[in-house]
Amino acid sequence: MKRVLITGAAGFIGSHLCDRFLREGFHVIGMDNLLTGSMKNIEHLFSEPHFEFHHHDITTYVHVAGDLDYILHFASPASPIDYLKMPIQTLKVGSLGTHHLLGLAKAKKSRILIASTSEVYGDPLIHPQVEEYWGNVNPIGPRGVYDEAKRFMEAITMAYHRFHGVEVRIIRIFNTYGPRMRIEDGRALPAFMAQALRGEGLTVYGDGSQTRSFCYVNDLVEGIYRLLHGAYSLPVNMGNPDEISIMQLAKEILDLVGNKEAYIDYRPLPEDDPKVRQPDISLAKRLFGWEPKVPRNEGLVHTLEYFKTELGK
């Protein structure tokens, strides 16, 4: 039985990865310091004989007994609210945490997949974003703690690959949504759903013309699985190229929820907020035959049902 270590296992994407790898017959070792993750996301796995959980902070030394075939590094605060509240922890998990896991991969001869982000492109001057684009990032701006942590993560990963021969995979994740997102996450989609269900104002920054591309979590997990088992070491974009404005998303959620008390609440645009975000996924299509399958209207319904349960609606 192959063994996989998944960091950030109690988080949104990490917990879905634990589910998938258990279904595929792996022994899954989940690791999380629960800074932003929740045990509720993985409590259904504790009866699984091939799942174990380690409450551990990977910015300190990481030890896993026995053989290890794969490492998936998904530990990090991921929303602007989180990394603006925890800037040092965000930088440390992207740098020290990644360094420790790469050392573990080298020692165990494991293949390691790291979760990078579309934020490495910053406020892009090229649209849609292709992997060859180096980005337009403000390294000392408020978002720099996340952007530069991920950019460093990619750099040290490629250094371990080139210098030590470690097998690496790098995914650049674009906006992803689905069940197990945190209500207080701060990103547009969970914020809109929670606000609409409560009959509050949907917080739209600026005029809402900034764009994002939303990929349902099941589609992303499929892409991660294919990338891990593929033979490509350079970064790969994964996300849904169906680009919409934040205002359009807000209106879709208002229509879906149908709460007549909810409304649009305009706020000033935050510093360095990207104006556009859309992945070019040509590489993922060509290498792995991967593209999103779940249409947004379907994914939003599944996600709304989750938030209704969380809010007792």
Image (cartoon, rainbow, N blue to C red):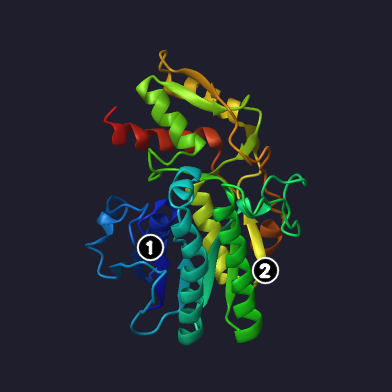
Q: Where is residue 306? Give x, y as percent.
A: 35, 38
- Helix, strand or loop under label 2: loop
Residue farthest front in this picture: 140
Against 16, residue 258 (above or below) is above
- 97 relative to 305 in the view: left or right: right
Q: Which mark is residue 210?
A: none
Which residue is located at x 35 percent, y 53 percent?
37
Which residue is located at x 40 percent, y 69 percent?
58
Q: Where is residue 187? Give x, y as percent.
A: 49, 39
Q: Which residue is the site of mark 1? A: 23
Q: Badge 1: how crowded within 10 Å, few (<14), some, or many (20+)? A: few
Image quarter hosting the C terminus: top left
Disc 1 residue type (three-letter): Arg
Inter-mark Cα distance, 1 to 2: 27 Å
Q: Where is residue 299? Give x, y as percent.
A: 48, 38
Disc 2 residue type (three-letter): Leu
Q: Please report whichever mark, 1 or 2, sits nearer to the chain's N-terminal start.
A: 1
- Helix, strand or loop under label 1: helix
- 70 relative to 154 in the view: left or right: left
> Are dots 1 and 2 in contact, CB under 8 Å?
no
Q: Which residue is the site of mark 2? A: 234
Asked if residue 60 shows in the view, the reply is: yes
- 72 relative to 223 in the view: left or right: left
